[in-house]
Image (cartoon, helix red, strand yellow):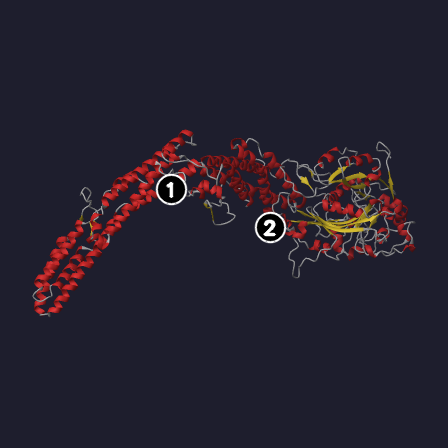
Amino acid sequence: MVNMEQNRPAHAVVVDLRHGAPVTGALKETEHDRTRRFLVIDGAADLVDHQLLYEQLYSYGPARLLCLATGAPGQRQLHRPLPLGPPEAGVLWLPDTLVGAAPGTDRFDASLRPLLELLVEPAVFDCVLGQLADVPHGVAVPAVHVLEHDLTDEARSRAWRQALEHLTGQDLPVSVTPPEQGTTSGGARQDGLTPELSLLLGRSVPRSLADRPWLTPGGRTDTRHEQCLDALHDTREAYEAVRGVAGLFGRAGKEADLPARFESLADALAAYRAEVAGALADGGGDRIRPEQRSRLLERGIELTEVPEVTRASVGPALRDHTERLLGQRLPLRSVAATLNALSGRSAPAGSTARLRRLDETCPPERVAELPLPPPFLMRLPWAADAGLTLLICCVAGLWPGAGWFTGPLCAAAAAGLAALMLRRRPGRSRDGRLDGGGDTRVLTRLAAGAVGGVTGAVAGTALSLPVWAGAVALAVALTALVLPAIHAWTAAVDDWWGQTDWAFAARAVEGIDELLADTVVHDWLLADARYHCSDAARAVAVLVGSMADTVEERLGAGPSADRALPLDEPGGPHAGPAGGFDWDSWGDGADDDRPEPTVTDAASYGTAFADGGAHDPFGAGGFGTGTRTGRDLGTDFDPGSGDAAVPGFGSGFGSDFTSGFGGPAAPGVGADFRSGFADGHAPDAAAASAPDPAAGGRSVPHAAGERSPAAEEHPHALRSLWPSGADGDGPPWLERETGDGGPELVDTLVGDLSHGAALILASRWAAVEREPATATRVPLRPLMNELLDEEHRRLIKDAAAAPPPYAPDPGNRPGIAGLLGVSSDRVRRLLADGGTEHVVPLCGAEHRRLLSKDPHAARRFRFAPEALRRGAEPETGQDAWPAAAEDVVWTAGGRHAGVLTLVPMRPDTVRSVRGEEGGTR
């Protein structure tokens, strides 16, 4: 794919030399690696003949070689060429990876698959080479016990289908969650957009344009704007002067001419509106042309640059927005729909289209009606006004005798105040040209006051009040007459002001200002950036949609589609008849199904060695507790060497290391087998029952009903080492455990694919930013297919436990329980500090006499993928993960955990030789 690799150790490249193939391809594959690693498969008898090929692997510079020397069952001495010498090279001799079980070339090659998957891991590769450097001649026979985790075929297919369905999604736009809340210099973020995109879409104005620098001081537009502001201020000032005592009795209220002020305000607003409408018409079109800039400049509008948002800043902002959408694992079609919506919103409609908004903000008919004053009316109801006047005049007439004059006089004063309010009403201009009319109830006040005055005079005479009481009543009445009149005047002026359109004019001026600012910023200054954002968002939406189409096609093809995944190394996945891939060479691996000791299946409890005998894997296979004798080990065994009990290998090859090389035979196997084992030849009886490779490589059965005593003592180990199916006769050192998929498997696959899709888009961002119209010409289908193939291969290989190189946070990847849905109990026991596990030497019984008997010569380490360590929770409590041993090698990927012991050869079994020129020995 596009550059997905980061600075991490490169996997070893597998080179199969068993058929003398050239190494040119392997050299080219590693020419960019910092450390070149080669995992070579070669025949043990052909090492010297292929010396020239090994030397060619060093031709591009320093390299590290690990050779798997296979086969040569009759060979008793290994010739190692000098290029395979330590410390940068080493040899693992694999006489028989099946340990004598199910012989046959196909099964032997299939048994290499787990070893290849394990040894190509850089950590394991380097550890093995480091251990071989301490071994004489750099040659050893491995003894292993491997625990392999995998998914069932149904779970793998289901998870893959669900991941593709989620990745495809539907055409529904969504809102991206903003990375942080709050506002920026460009205003609040909308729909989680970046500040640059938010400025392009919203009505906010960048901080650099907050002072309206586009208005030329003294220009026509600026002058019209200032006239509107001055008219609004003058009208408001006149209104404040008319209110209260000063407005009713003072000179300021008499000189204030509110209708004339409103007329000036209407003229200023109409002029400003016309100027802005003309500017909108002059600046119409897709982009501002030079002649349009000139006309706008004549109107006093100068277009400057916006430093916050430019065409160059749109691409990174759009990329950040798109990658955030993909980072939230949204479906591809939803991402495409969101980008299409963004494209539509960011495309400028042109300033001419804003004329309608201008009409809505400042309708011309409202501006024409602005000078027309409303009528001036009293706030109190008619009855309340008349009753209050009557009461006041009645109190004024209570003065005995004089009340006949004071009562009617008070009524006349009330009528006079009403007449004054009518004359000074704010809706009448000084020249009388503009007059909204009004009614202050002069006659009503006069009539009610007269009635009240006469009534008060009659009452004062009848009551014969003292003179001082009448004088006090008159003072109270006059006060009560003036104060309510002032309050009624102020209330009536406020009501009249509320009926005017001054508030509309203020809102219209503010709305026109905002409209002009939006037009200048978004339609003129940011027009190029908005068009570029619209085109780029549409182009990215097309690219994302094409990736969604690719995923949908893959989903519609189904699991039976004949699509071959690329192979990384020999012995990797191979296509079956239907085109599907098979990483499982050993059947279903149902290790929890314990086989029953039937006649046809009893061979599962024994090991069919090359000599034709059936051996108990816990005895002759290396796990028994039998007593070692000189006859068992052949003539080379020295009883006095002190190695009758080898404590250093108690956890590796059983309770007694050497008992695995020559322990008692399994029940049902007589002394003929041991004698045949000692001299390297099988007896005729055993040979007669040896399996025929052409017949499927089945094991030689035990006698009916017989079982090994060691098998009774270790039922779990026996069940683990041998698959339950009759056709699943895998190597005895391989233990398999399958799961039905964990709760985080689908989300992990979707996350990997989403991040991979973002990485694919990264290859087109330069083209999108440069020219969006041509960015979609290069199809992304091949890259998307490659991404799907790669992720599918990861799913097949280790259930996506190993993070891809482009994973943003590989440390938080789910563990084995969350991905495979299997327990990590076996692995934590295997990796626990002080834990023990049986290992099986990858050689036949006839080769074990060639191994070193030195208990301190063997090298041992354990290995496990990082996914198992990530799944090591909980860390406290009864189910806590024990402390891992110091010799554990953690691999970045893979699905294998276990123990690997490197058993050196006897000194006289390995010879370092130099091949003759031309590659011959």
- Res. 298 image quadrant: top left
Q: Is residue 813 left or right of residue 341?
A: right
- Res. 516 image quadrant: top left
Residue plotted at (46% across, 40% down): 200
The amino acid sitting under disc 2 is: Pro
**Residue position for label 1:** 514
The secondary element bearing badge 2 is classed as: loop
Label 1: how many Cα within 10 Å (few below 14, some 14–19, many 20+): some
Q: Please tell me the numbered disc located at residue 743.
A: 2
Please state the horizontal and vertical placement of residue 487, each as a whole percent of the image.
22, 56
The amino acid sitting under disc 1 is: Glu
Sequence-wise first label, 2 or 1:
1
Please state the horizontal and vertical placement of residue 18, each as a whole percent of the image.
79, 36
Residue toward you, 171 or 456 = 456
Please state the horizontal and vertical placement of residue 337, each as a whole percent of the image.
49, 39
Label 2: how many Cα within 10 Å (few below 14, some 14–19, many 20+): some
